[in-house]
Image (cartoon, rainbow, N blue to C red):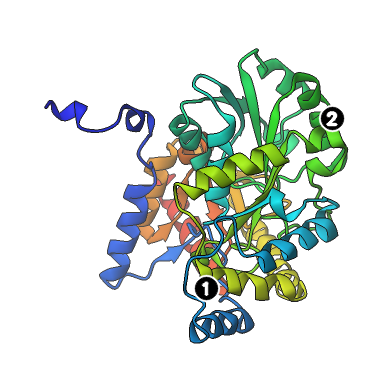
């Protein structure tokens, strides 16, 4: 057997992570005792609240360690329905809710049941790194919609219409977004919804950063506007960012009945149920107030503002103020370096880790995460400013 025939053809479409070399190098340097300032984190630095951990411990002690229903325990699904109604004005019945192994799993499941071979999936650029790879795994074709910093990296209706073809099946929206922190207003989403309804295009609405939104803005769910767009939308969320539960792997979605049923069948024969103990922890999280999420958001906004004040004094880097999430997407084109070289050299020469923008489809940018303390942000900015001065000589 030839070596190139040993693996499935679909895997040839998947690109290796362009950030792997950077993150691996950072871990190696840290293990060698180097003082690494990490701006690469895609998760909150806050610990999971104690009451959530206590609920997990109680689940273990009480023997809640067996299989559960594939789509989640009834208690959790009921709470998710209540959350959708309270926070998003969305009416989902428990049968329309699927609990999965993280929001990423939820998005992948949705794409798997919606996308046929050669169907086109529209993805605003910059994009979260896994979107195009998941589309390719489903044998779909990712089509990218360019955005601009002048519009806070959001697509317009004009942009959307230009990219629609007879093969267009799905639009992926992420608000607040990773990596740019873009937040779509109600008016913007209503206009997008009208186009999607008129062309019968599904929307996968990734709302995982919903609780991390700044300056008094309000999060809007596109599926809440009317029945037409509701019937074309899969609303994805989870507890990773809002409750600092990234490692617990609990995500969920709400979808029209036929889509939800199809995802249930798919999950029956792939992962089956998400972790039983983590589901009990999720019950505790959704039963509590939003105090933890509100306080986390307040701290993230303080960090954003401090980071912005430091970056604004560095002439060779520009940025658009993020409206949500915990990332600053920074233009480095004035340095003359591509994002991989920029990230590699900054790490090797100043021990500061950032994510190259090529991972998000834009090589003139880097992503700086402010999911770390202000003191650490200050130290990293000191090093970045010094390094930029040195390489410009």
Mark 1, secondary structure of its residue: helix
On the image, numbered disc 2 is attached to which residue? 191
Question: Which corner quadrant of the image does residue 282 belong to?
Answer: bottom right
Q: Quadrant of the C terminus?
A: top left
Q: Is residue 55 visible?
A: yes
Q: Position of residue 200 (x, y in %)?
A: 74, 23
- Which of label 2 and label 1 is nearer to you? 1
Q: Quadrant of the N terminus?
A: top left
Above-or-below relation of 110 to 155: below
Q: Position of residue 216 (x, y in %)?
A: 85, 59
The residue lying furthest to the left in this view is 1
On the image, numbered disc 1 is attached to which residue? 277
Q: CA distance from mark 2 to mark 1?
A: 41 Å
Q: In the rendered view, does 75 fall on the left or right side of 317? A: right
Please name the residue shown 59% across and 81% down the image.
55
Q: Is residue 316 visible?
A: no
Q: Position of residue 385 (x, y in %)?
A: 50, 56
Estimate how packed mark 1 is, as few (under 14), some (14 to 19) or many (20 or more) residues with alpha carbons within 10 Å: many
Which of the pair 36/86 is nearer the observer? 86
Q: Position of residue 63 (x, y in %)?
A: 49, 81
Q: Which of the two discs, 2 and 1, labels the residue nearer the N terminus? A: 2
């Amino acid at each position: 057997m030839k070596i190139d025939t040993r693996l499935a053809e679909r895997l040839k479409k998947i690109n290796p992570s362009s950030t792997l070399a950077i993150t691996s190098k950072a871990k190696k340097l840290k293990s060698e005792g180097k003082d690494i300032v990490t701006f690469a984190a895609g998760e909150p630095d806050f610990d999971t609240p104690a009451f959530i951990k206590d609920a997990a411990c109680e689940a273990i002690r009480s023997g809640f360690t067996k299989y559960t229903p594939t789509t989640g325990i009834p208690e959790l699904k009921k709470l998710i329905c209540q959350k959708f109604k309270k926070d998003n004005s969305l009416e989902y019945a428990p049968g329309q809710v699927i609990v999965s192994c993280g929001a990423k799993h939820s998005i992948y499941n949705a794409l798997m049941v919606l996308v046929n071979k050669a169907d086109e999936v529209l993805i605003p650029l910059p994009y979260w790194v896994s979107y195009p790879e998941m589309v390719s795994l489903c044998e779909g074709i990712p089509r990218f919609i360019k955005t601009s910093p002048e519009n806070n990296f959001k697509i317009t209706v004009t942009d959307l219409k230009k990219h629609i073809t007879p093969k267009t099946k799905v639009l992926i929206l992420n608000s607040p977004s990773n990596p740019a922190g873009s937040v779509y207003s109600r008016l913007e989403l209503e206009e997008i919804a009208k186009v999607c309804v008129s062309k019968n295009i599904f929307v996968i609405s990734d709302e995982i950063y919903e609780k991390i939104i700044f300056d008094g803005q309000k999060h809007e769910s596109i599926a809440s506007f009317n029945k037409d767009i509701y019937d074309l939308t899969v609303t994805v969320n989870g507890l990773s960012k809002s409750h600092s539960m990234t490692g617990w792997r609990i995500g969920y979605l709400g979808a029209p009945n036929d889509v939800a049923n199809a995802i249930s069948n798919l999950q029956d024969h792939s992962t089956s149920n998400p972790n039983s103990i983590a589901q009990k922890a999720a019950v505790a999280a959704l039963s509590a107030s939003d105090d933890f999420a509100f306080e986390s958001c307040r701290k993230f906004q303080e960090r954003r503002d401090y980071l912005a004040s430091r970056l604004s004094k560095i002439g060779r880097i520009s940025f658009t103020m993020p409206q949500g999430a915990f990332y600053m997407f920074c233009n480095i084109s004035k340095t003359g370096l591509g994002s991989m070289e920029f990230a590699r050299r900054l790490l090797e020469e100043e021990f500061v880790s950032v994510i190259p923008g090529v991972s998000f489809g834009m090589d003139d940018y880097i992503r700086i995460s402010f999911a770390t303390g202000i003191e650490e942000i200050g130290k990293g900015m000191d090093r970045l400013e010094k390094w930029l001065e040195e390489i410009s000589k």
